[in-house]
Image (cartoon, rainbow, N blue to C red):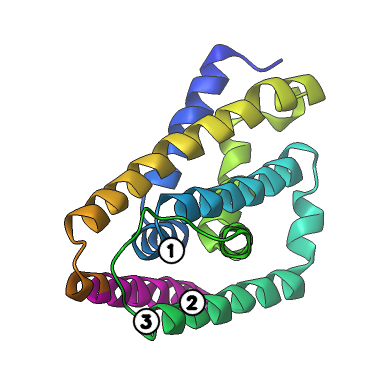
Amino acid sequence: MITLTDILAYTLALGVAVAIPGPGITALVARSVGSGAQAGYAMLCGVIIGDFLYLSFAVFGLALIATSFGTLFTIIRWGSVAYLLYLAWQFWSAEHHEMSGGENTRHELRAAVATGLVITLGNPKAIAFYLALLPLVLDLNNITFVSWAGILVPVTIFVLLGVGSIYILGAIAIRQILSSSTAQQRLHRVAAVAMAGAAGTIILREM
């Protein structure tokens, strides 16, 4: 049976892991700066889905299965690199106009969700946390379906929303302060560099 100490340990470990900037956080900030809060939270939803999948792999004893598909995860990681570089190019070459309230089309929001999911699935930090570190934080043999669904999943969503919101709102504050056309161009360039940097981080970890 999972205890209060286990819950606190998991919450702290996940919070620290998420708060440390990596490819996911970098891309989240870049998306929020470039496209606004809607796109930022849509991307965060994709991140949460990816974390949910890895959490499920670990809790239900599927870590061995997940790690055995080394080729598949390598393809996912390189796919996320290619997608990040594509987004970097989009931000860099975007037409610049006065910023609106941050409204996004359904296609843009779906793309943001997909970005968050792909980046999380290809993020070595997420893989290391759920498939390597998590078994050291929790005794997975003591976790039942009820404790997974009633405790770990809500805690995971709460932590990711909390930490992610801090980064998103910080990015939005910067975006609103620098609202001129020239500043918008610079923000898009910063977002492009951040996306490219996130891709570079994944590449370096693959070497």
Query: In the figure, is residue 149 to the left or right of 94?
Result: right
Label 1: which residue?
27
- If you read the primary sequence from the N terminus, does the residue marked by circle 2 or circle 1 appear first? 1
Q: Residues within 10 Å of mark 1 (few under 14, many from 20)?
A: many
| Mark 2 or 3: the one toward you | 3
Locate the N terminus by quadrant: top right
Given residues 97 and 183, the one toward you in this image is 97
The residue shown at (34%, 70%) is 191
Q: Which residue is mark 2?
A: 87
Q: Earlier in the sequence, mark 1 or mark 3?
A: 1
Q: Residue 132 location in percent, x, y?
A: 60, 49
Q: Secondary structure at mark 2?
A: helix
Q: Amino acid at mark 1?
A: Ala
- The span picked out in magenta is 185-207
- Visible in this render: residue 207? no
Asked if 32 appears above or below 95 in the picture, the reply is: above
Residue at (41% x, 72% y) in the render: 195
Amino acid type, residue under disc 3 in the picture: Glu
Mark 2 vs mark 3: which is more N-terminal? Answer: 2
Q: Is residue 98 above or below residue 150?
A: below
Frontmost residue, 68 versus 101:
101
The percent coordinates of residue 173 (x first, y second) are 24, 49
* Residue at image point 60% right, 66% down: 122
- Tag 2–tag 1 contact (CB < 8 Å): yes
In the displayed structure, would residue 159 be above or below residue 114?
Answer: above
Q: Tell me: residue 101, above or below residue 204.
A: above
Coordinates of residue 75 in the picture (x, y in percent): 69, 77
Q: Which of these two is toward me, 194 or 179? A: 179
Q: Is residue 191 magenta?
A: yes
Q: Nearer the viewer, mark 1 or mark 3?
A: 3
Residue placed under numbered mark 3 in the picture: 95
**What is the secondary structure assignment of the residue under circle 1?**
helix
